[in-house]
Image: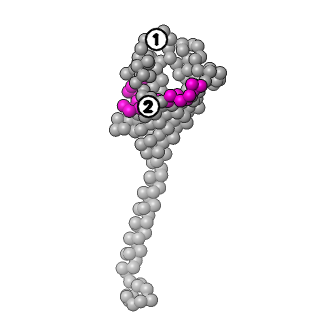
Amino acid sequence: MCGTDLPGKSFDGPFNLVFTMQKSFYFLSFVGIIVFGMIEAPTYAQSDEADIRAVIDHLFDGMRAGDSTMVRSVLHEEALMARAGSQGLRIGPVDGFVQAVGTPHDEIWDERIWNIQISVDGRLASAWMEFAFFLGDRPSHCGVNSMQFYRTDEGWKIIYLADTSRPPTCEVPPNGP
């Protein structure tokens, strides 16, 4: 029997089998795309986290080297800085900071970081970390850095850098940051 088109009747013909196979193919293709997409997503996120960590390290390596060009290279052109300390909140452009890094100074500016937490969503990311800032071998202050990043066509750039500042009473991890 070939089936009919009458209301309340089912179509049992060969067309129904082909139609069912097409639906199955589309459904399985859809599921496959979702599954493969889920497998790729963590790899992509891990790559972003590694790239962001490289930006953070480049910033602090530039500070230690006193190299304002190196520091500027990881900052977005419109980046801002903020400090929340005992004097209140100060917010401004990064230009003064970049200039200070490049101005010759007797001691190495060594910001040691640990307990780094990075979160990524698309082209926006944030990082939170504890730090201790040393002038040479002498602790100056410590606190927490909060950084916001934007992924440009050239890679991740810091768009906002905020920190707290308190007396150097924090404990740097014994095995190093």
Q: Residues within 10 Å of mark 1 (few under 14, many from 20)?
A: few
**Viewer-closest of 70 and 6:** 70
12 relative to 177, above or below:
below
Calculate the distance from the C-alpha at mark 2 to the C-alpha at mark 1. Answer: 23 Å
**Is-magenta flag for residue 84?**
yes
| Residue 114 in sight in this render | no
| Residue 127 in sight in this render | yes
- Give the residue at mark 1: 105
- Quadrant of the snapshot with the N terminus: bottom left
- The quadrant in which residue 58 appears is top left
Q: Is residue 92 left or right of residue 117?
A: left
13 relative to 124, above or below:
below
Residue type at mark 2?
Leu
Residue type at mark 1?
His
- Mark whose residue sits in front, 2 or 1: 2
Please name the residue shown 37% across and 75% down the image: 18
Q: Give the range drawn in magenta.
A: 71-90
The kind of secondary structure the magenta stretch mainly shows is: strand
Residue 176 on image: x %, y %: 60, 23
Q: In this view, does 114 lie to the left or right of 38?
A: right
Please name the residue shown 39% across and 90% down the image: 6
- Quadrant of the snapshot with the C terminus: top right
- Give the residue at mark 2: 80
